[in-house]
Image (spheres, grey):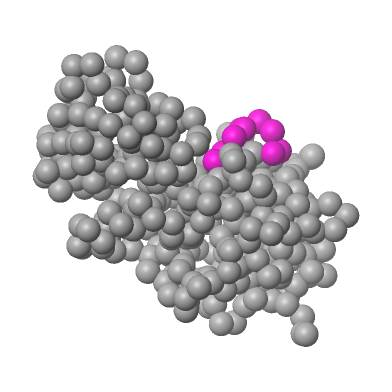
Amino acid sequence: MGRRSVLVLHTGGTLGMIGSPLEPGTYAQALAERVPELERIAHLETEIVCNLDSSDIGPAEWTAVAEAIARRRAAFDGFVVVHGTDTMAYTASALAFALRGLDRPVVLTGAQRPLAALRTDARRNLQDAVEVATWPVPEVGICFDGLLLRGCRAVKADARSYRAFDTPGLEPLARFGVDIELGRHIRHPRAPFACDARFDPRVAVVHVSPGLDARSVAALLDGGGLRGIVLAAYGVGTVPARDGRLAAVLREASQAGVEVLVVTQHGGLVSLGMYRNSQALAESGAIAGGKMRVEAAVPKLMHALAVHSDRAARRSYLEGDAAGEQD
């Protein structure tokens, strides 16, 4: 077997930031000059997709990254996406849904401290990400602090710790110790590779809270521009239902063609038939999001709206398991 090749796609983030306050700086295409150890792991090439704080990254950038991977897929054994941490889990989920039948690693990484800073975690994260990009792990993952996590199950768990990400209820895909220990639950392609990186951004997130006024949700819908709502509910999918107003607003939205995807704020499996206050959502036409958290539900709903014009097919896609988000 010859030397492995890895394409590093740069999108920005803390890893390459400079100054105070931190902002995107000039990113050197010759990454190996800054971290020369990387060339001992694989032959590297770098492509700059964008250079943004990750709070500015959204559907347009998801599409650009996915299409860059699809365009150059045959030339590389794996891909590393350098990305800011704030929206990394959203991008990882979007790539997992866009890149169907993925047959090689796509590894997102970044840092809590810039590469040029003292005590930076950037160097280790880059080394681990490039190495795992040469391994037989055909998933979109997030590599951080010695762990490789499934991208579409990941959440940002801590902004002040080097262990920034977690996949609640799911073991890591890999652990980096003296050796790399791969998990037994790594997914493998079941269909030929295909890229469909369309996303409809007309989606809003509503977090259920005590005293949530149904009129606030109705106001979101009044303009007629929304096509989807991700409803972050309590527990296994409960919402305030005593006066029935919220369910009525959501029923009206569903009848108007707006998809309402219910996820939980707390982790676990959404079940819209367990409690009366969750059954009201099912009766309104809402869709149970299963194990998805907001970070996966938003890009999946955007993807479903863009790709599936048939509503039955769209709802089936949202309820099913496309990339391990329900494992």
Q: Is residue 31 magenta?
A: no
Q: Is residue 43 above or below residue 117?
A: below
| Residue 189, quarter of picture | bottom right
Give the position of the N terminus as an image quadrant: bottom right
List x then y, in percent, for residue 90.
47, 48
Q: Nearer the viewer, residue 317 or 90?
A: 317
The secondary structure making up most of the magenta span is loop
- Residue farthest bottom in this picture: 1
Q: Is residue 54 visible?
A: no
The answer to whether residue 123 is left or right of residue 109 is: right
Task: Give me the residue at 75% from left, 64% from top.
Answer: 131
Q: Nearer the viewer, residue 291 or 139?
A: 291
| Residue displayed at 58% across by 64% down | 187
Q: Position of residue 280 (x, y in %)?
A: 24, 30
At 47% across and 64% down in the image, what residue appears? 65
What span is in magenta? Answer: 155-163
